[in-house]
Image (spheres, grey):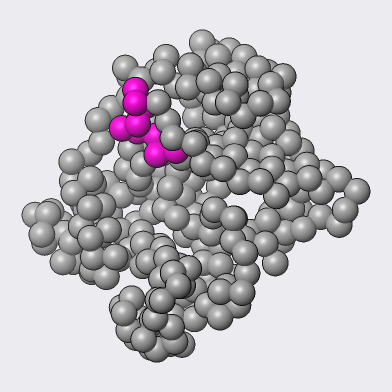
Amino acid sequence: MHYHQIRPSPLLASFVQCYWTIKVETRGLPAPDHGVMPGGYVDLVFNVGDKVCKSDSGGVFVAQAKSFVIGPFDRFQRFRVEGQFEFLGVRFHQGRSPFCSDLPLGEVRNQAVPLSAVWEDARLTAEIQTLEFRLAQESQTGRRIVCVEQFLIKFLGSWKEPDVVVTQALDLIEEAKGQISVENLASVLGVSSRHLERKFIQYVGLSPKAFCRVTRFRHVKLLLESIHGPSGCDLAYACGYYDQTHLIREFRSFTGQTPARYERSQPVGFFLYD
């Protein structure tokens, strides 16, 4: 199993948080479940391996040799690959995805939508098909990223600046580690709760309440992975949960595991294996 994160070029750094790659060879072996933990991000994902199926239904989630916009998750997702699992991903900063002017990001929550269905312009469709072909021919990660950056830079001029209210809200949620009510958030920003929710569905893909839950989970995850972090009830209270039972229930919905079991597992980036 190989997972790496790579910084974007300075030209794209205001929109792109990082590139990431994961590769797991499972040909000839029993297919393991690939669990994905939510982070509140939108990713552009290129599948350069075999098709990816949902573990619960067996339906195809990501087809082979295709590019997809994968919306933010608000729950743990399990996938299975019969063969080689290999993704190249572009992770966008929260609230700065280039797709939000083409569709409300709430429509891709917990889903994978072909990039060609998001950018339906004939010229863009040809560009996407060319990029998918080039990535399928390349085997080196560095060269693949060069191809992706060349593609993204072409459209950089048409990307809109992030929404000011959403950007301020994201900063406040991060500062509070998710421990802030939607009502207080809207009050500080001087907007109504409904107006804030509409903007979040458009530009983030999750409601403000769901995004706060995910942010609080990320803080719990960070503390669990630290050497001297709190545990048990101390962890629950430090992260704003009512009690340890509340923490365990929330944590299980985001990882499929209890915090105690998670500490014994070996997460790889935002992927988790049983």
Q: Nearer the viewer, residue 159 or 191?
A: 159
Q: Quadrant of residue 31?
A: bottom right
Question: Which residues, given as a range, are shown in magenta?
Answer: 10-18
Q: Is residue 13 magenta?
A: yes
- At 41% from the left and 43% from the top, the residue drawn is 105
Relative side of 170 to 74, left or right: left
Residue 250 location (% of width, % of height): 46, 75
Q: Find the residue positioned furthest to the front.
A: 227
Count of labels shown?
Answer: 0
Residue 188 location (% of width, % of height): 10, 59
Relative side of 39 to 212, left or right: right
Does 129 sit above or below residue 203? above
Q: Nearer the viewer, residue 66 or 109?
A: 66
Residue 227 location (% of width, % of height): 45, 72
- At 61% from the left and 46% from the top, the residue drawn is 3
Q: Is residue 44 magenta?
A: no
Residue 213 location (% of width, % of height): 37, 66
Q: Nearer the viewer, residue 28 or 157?
A: 28
Q: Quadrant of residue 42?
A: top left
Overall secondary structure of the magenta stretch? Answer: loop
Q: Quadrant of the C terminus?
A: bottom right
| Residue 199 visible | yes
- At 69% from the left and 21% from the top, the residue drawn is 138
Q: Quadrant of residue 180?
A: bottom left
Q: Find the residue positioned furthest to the right.
A: 28
- At 44% from the left and 87% from the top, the residue drawn is 232
| Residue 103 visible | no
Does 181 sit above or below residue 114? below
